[in-house]
Image (spheres, helix red, strand yellow):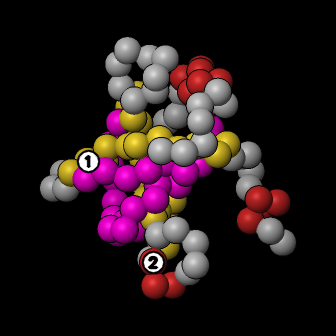
Amino acid sequence: MEAAERREFPRLEARLVVDLRTKYIYTTGSILNISSNGLFIKTQNPLPEGSELELATHLPELKKPTFFKGIVRWVRKASTSPLPAGMGIELLLPNERKMKKIFKIIQHLPKSI
C-alpha cells in the first residue's frame, strides 16, 4: 500500500522556509508538504525522534510569522533513501481554522523555494 493511501489526513505540497527551535537548537529547513496535523521538513540535520520543537514560517499574505508546536515522529537520513533527508512532524494541538487559512495561501504559492 502506498504511503498516501495510508494517510488519514491528505497532504498538500508546499515549499516554505521554516525556522526550527528546541530548548538547545535553532536551525532552518524547508517544509515540503503539510496536512492538517503534520508536515515534512527537508533538512540535512534532522532532530532525533521524540524531539519537541517550535516552528515559524512566513506566508506572503500574512504580516506576522505563523507559529506551530510539534514533535518529531520519524526521521529520514540522506544515506538511507533517495528521497530528501528530513523529518516528519506531528503538530501539537493544530488549530483547524488556522490550518484552513494556511492551506488556502499555500495553494496559490509557487512550488519552489
Give the image location of residue 70, x and y in percent.
42, 47
- Residue of label 1: 21
Residue type of the residue flagged with mark 1: Arg
Residue type of the residue flagged with mark 2: Ala
**Secondary structure beneath disc 2?**
helix
Give the image location of residue 5, x and y in percent.
82, 60
Q: Residue furthest bottom?
A: 79
- Identify the image quadrant of residue 2: bottom right
Give the distance between the C-alpha atoms of the residues marked 1 and 2, in whole angstroms: 21 Å
- Identify the image quadrant of residue 18: top left
- Residue of label 2: 78
Image mark for residue 38:
none
Q: Residue furthest left?
A: 24
Residue at (52% x, 34% y) in the render: 94
Residue at (44% x, 17% y) in the render: 62
Q: Is residue 42 magenta?
A: yes
| Discs 1, 2 touching: Cβ within 8 Å | no
The residue range painted magenta reads: 27-56
Above or below: residue 65 compared with residue 88? above
